[in-house]
Amino acid sequence: MLRICLNIIKGEPVDIEELGEFGLIERIKGSFKSRDRRLLQGIGDDTAALSTAGDKVTLLTTDLLLEGIHFDLRLNSPYYLGRKTLAVNLSDIAAMGGIPQYFLLSLGIPRHYPVEFFSEFFRGLKELSRDYRVSLIGGDTSASAGKLTISITVLGEVHRAQMIGRAGAAVGNQIFVTGTLGDSLLGLKILQDSGNPVQSLRKFPRVVLKHLDPRPRIKEGRLIAEKGLATAMIDLSDGLLADLSHLTREIGLGARLWREKLPLSNYYRRNILSFEKDRWNLALAGGEDYELLFTVDRAKVEPLKCLSSRFDCRLTHIGEVVKGKEGLKVVDEKGRPHKINLSGYDHFRTQVTF
């Protein structure tokens, strides 16, 4: 079916695996160009932006979560699944500097699922929605012939002058990230290795919760937007290198990351070598950290550092934007290149290289 759809769009046979997730998005984007002046940001970003009354911008983002692809119920609980389902969408709003307001929920439910499962799912969902003051306003339900399918659409708002997109980075901009890197994928590896979520949570609570119960950086995104400090911003869903390439390589720029500056939690430092031969792999390519990655003009670095005292997480200066011909590089403390032999996440490809 996917092959047929692509043939219709471009008139040539191609496998979806060969094209890849982002190649597919580019084809769709090319076929659905809009001339609507109200559309400030459309296909290609995680969040769409529509100009509305006055200086306000409406933000819209949607995500699809599939059992067996995005979550494994043997390693998760319905309570944490409900929380994470909403959190990953709120993170997209945070990356635009916005305020989330409402959400729609659609569910494809296998007939054999017990009612108790959804009691716990909605308990987690409701708790997180209260924490971030967002309201469920509608959606849809359907029977599923296969596995559980979840789709959430979040609506938010931001002042037009404060909205932060992906494409504003420039040579000389400094690269910052909130929180720590690699914890979520390490938490997943711990869960997979033990096969016992309760035991894993008890032994490694921080990294396991980072995977099961991520915290969208709404507060930090708003502070950065209000002060006009970021030239471009994205949330870390596909991994540091993959998401950094969206901010730089896609607009013809390069980046230099300082390996020893990458923020690693104490849990990560103590346990990473039990799961990876290279201690840096998960920090560079691990997905689902849902931290904010952004670029800042040199003149605004000090104001940003002062502002970070109001953050609920750490802020780390990890690199700088360079000319495109220099590519995307990771260097050690002596300036020597760190060999990148990693892959970012792509739904349709087995490997995406940098």
Image: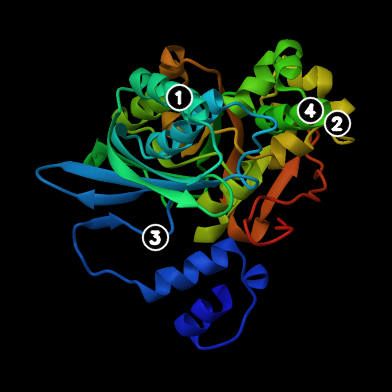
Q: Earlier in the sequence, mark 2 or mark 1?
A: 1
Q: Earlier in the sequence, mark 2 or mark 4?
A: 4
* Residue 303 seen in the current view: no
Identify the residue under disc 2: 275
User: Can you give x and y, in whole percent of width and height, for residue 199 in the image?
Assistant: 76, 15
Which of the labelled discs sits on residue 119, or is there none?
Answer: 1
Q: Which residue occupies 86% across, 34% down? A: 276
The amino acid type found where label 2 is placed reads: Phe
Q: Is label 4 in contact with label 1 (beta carbons under 8 Å)?
A: no
Which mark lies nearer to you, 2 or 4? Answer: 4
What SS does tag 3 mark?
A: loop
User: Can you give x and y, in whole percent of width and height, for residue 94 in the image?
Assistant: 40, 34
Point out the image quarter for the C terminus: bottom right
Which residue is nearer to you in this view: 129 or 52?
129
Which mark lies nearer to you, 2 or 1? Answer: 1
Which residue is nearer to you in this view: 323 or 314?
314
Q: Earlier in the sequence, mark 3 or mark 4?
A: 3
The amino acid type found where label 4 is placed reads: Gly
Identify the residue under disc 3: 43
Identify the residue under disc 4: 195
Q: Earlier in the sequence, mark 3 or mark 1?
A: 3
Q: Is label 2 in contact with label 3 (beta carbons under 8 Å)?
A: no
Q: Which residue occupies 58% across, 62% down? A: 21
Q: Which residue occupies 46% across, 50% down? A: 143
